[in-house]
Image: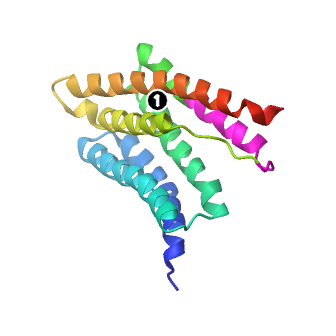
């Protein structure tokens, strides 16, 4: 039977299940499939915000959701970044902002794993939420950037990726500084 408390976890699971489809569509590279990839990617990003909102608003947070939601987000972002680099949509200097984002995702996952058995919780900043939003938007632009005559879409994607990577460095610093107390 379908229960309200399952909706956030179901959205997270659906986000994970759609990632391989997005990757296949990106690999095909055809304009039609790139737009389908963008559509599915957008749904995945919206589900990220919706599952968190529902879980908090209706007090439906679960251990399963706290564990799986950040993993789903990281798999989505890292997979799309990897495919965009692999297909040379992200290239040259802009590989470095992508790398910064990937390294931060690994470091934060490592920290969460390290403190998994702690009674303390890791603090997250509101700026991190903005970083995620900018990161998701920029990747959306990059997904379809090859299918426009003008390079403005590519520029917007690169600009957003660069801003997100700078915010990643800043929020990563804040994240580690605020959570340094957990190392003591």
Give whichever of 82, 103 is nearer the camera: 103
The magenta span reads: 102-119
Q: Quick one: quadrant of the C terminus? A: top right
Residue at the far left in the pictured view: 149
Q: Residues within 10 Å of mark 1 (few under 14, many from 20)?
A: few
Say whether residue 41 is magenta: no
**171 relative position to 54: left or right:** right
Residue for point 49% across, 68% down: 58
149 with respect to 88 (left or right): left
Q: Position of residue 175 (x, y in %)?
A: 62, 31
Residue placed most toward the observer, 129 or 105? 129
Q: Residue at x 66, y 26 (%)?
A: 177
Q: Residue 114 in magenta? A: yes
Q: Which residue is mark 1?
A: 86
Disc 1 is placed on an element classified as helix
**20 or 62, which lies in front?**
62
Q: Eyeballing the image, is 65 above or below 25?
A: below
Q: Which scheme is used to colour this image of the protein?
A: rainbow
The residue sitting at 63% across, 40% down in the picture is 123
Q: Quadrant of residue 133?
A: top left
């Amino acid at each position: 039977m379908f229960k309200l408390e399952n909706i956030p976890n179901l959205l997270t699971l659906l986000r994970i299940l759609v990632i391989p489809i997005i990757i296949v569509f990106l690999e095909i590279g055809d304009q039609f499939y790139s737009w389908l990839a963008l559509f599915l990617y957008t749904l995945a990003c919206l589900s990220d915000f919706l599952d968190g909102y529902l879980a908090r608003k209706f007090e439906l947070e679960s251990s399963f959701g706290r564990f799986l939601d950040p993993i789903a987000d990281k798999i989505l972002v890292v997979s799309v970044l990897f495919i965009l680099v692999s297909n040379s949509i992200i290239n040259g200097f802009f590989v470095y902002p992508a790398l910064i984002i990937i390294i931060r995702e690994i470091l934060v996952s490592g920290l969460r794993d390290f403190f998994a058995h702690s009674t303390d919780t890791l603090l997250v900043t509101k700026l991190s939420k903005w970083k995620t939003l900018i990161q998701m938007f920029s990747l959306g632009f990059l997904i379809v950037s090859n299918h426009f005559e003008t390079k403005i879409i590519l520029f917007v994607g690169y600009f957003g990726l660069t801003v997100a990577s700078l915010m990643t460095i800043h929020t990563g610093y804040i994240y580690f500084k605020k959570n340094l107390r957990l190392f003591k």
